[in-house]
Amino acid sequence: MTLAKAMQMIRPFEGLPHYETAVAQLHVASCRGKREIHRAAYRMRDAFVAYDYAVNYGSAGERAI
């Protein structure tokens, strides 16, 4: 996985807290290789999805991911 693809995976969550930290961590992971950035990107995406679901659970204005 490339850094551009990893950034594209978390881009829908740009307004959520800790987005800037996630971007910085993706840059660090990209220095460690493709396997590490792959793991980091999916881990961050899953964390953002879980957070977004927990915050917006039951609200009528849920956004599509």
Image: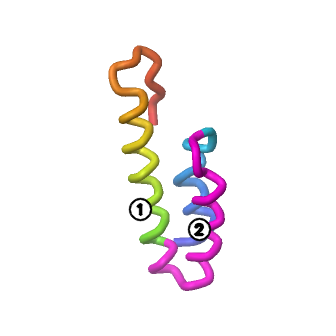
The residue lying toward the viewer, choosing from 9 and 44, is 44
Most extreme residue toward the top is: 60
Q: Amino acid at mark 1?
A: Arg
Please report the residue visible at 63 percent of the width from the left and 60 percent of the height from the top.
23
Per the image, the residue denoted by label 2 is 26
Q: Residue furthest left?
A: 58
Q: Position of residue 10 (x, y in %)?
A: 54, 52
Residue 18 position, x and y percent, is: 58, 51
Q: Which residues are magenta?
A: 16-37
SS label for mark 1: helix
Q: Quadrant of residue 28?
A: bottom right
Would you say the magenta stretch is mainly helix, strand or loop?
helix
**Which mark is first along the chain, 1 or 2?**
2
**Residue hosting label 1:** 43
Figure check: 49 above or below 62: below
Q: What residue is at 37 percent from the left and 44 percent from the top?
A: 50
The residues bearing labels 2 and 1 have C-alpha atoms spaced at a distance of: 11 Å
For the rendered model, the colour scheme is rainbow
Residue at 56% in and 76% down? 29
Q: Position of residue 11 (x, y in %)?
A: 60, 48
The count of marks equals: 2
Quarter of the figure with residue 25: bottom right
Which amino acid, by three-letter code, is at mark 2? Leu
Front residue of 42/18: it is 18
Residue 33's tag is none
58 is within the stretch colored magenta: no
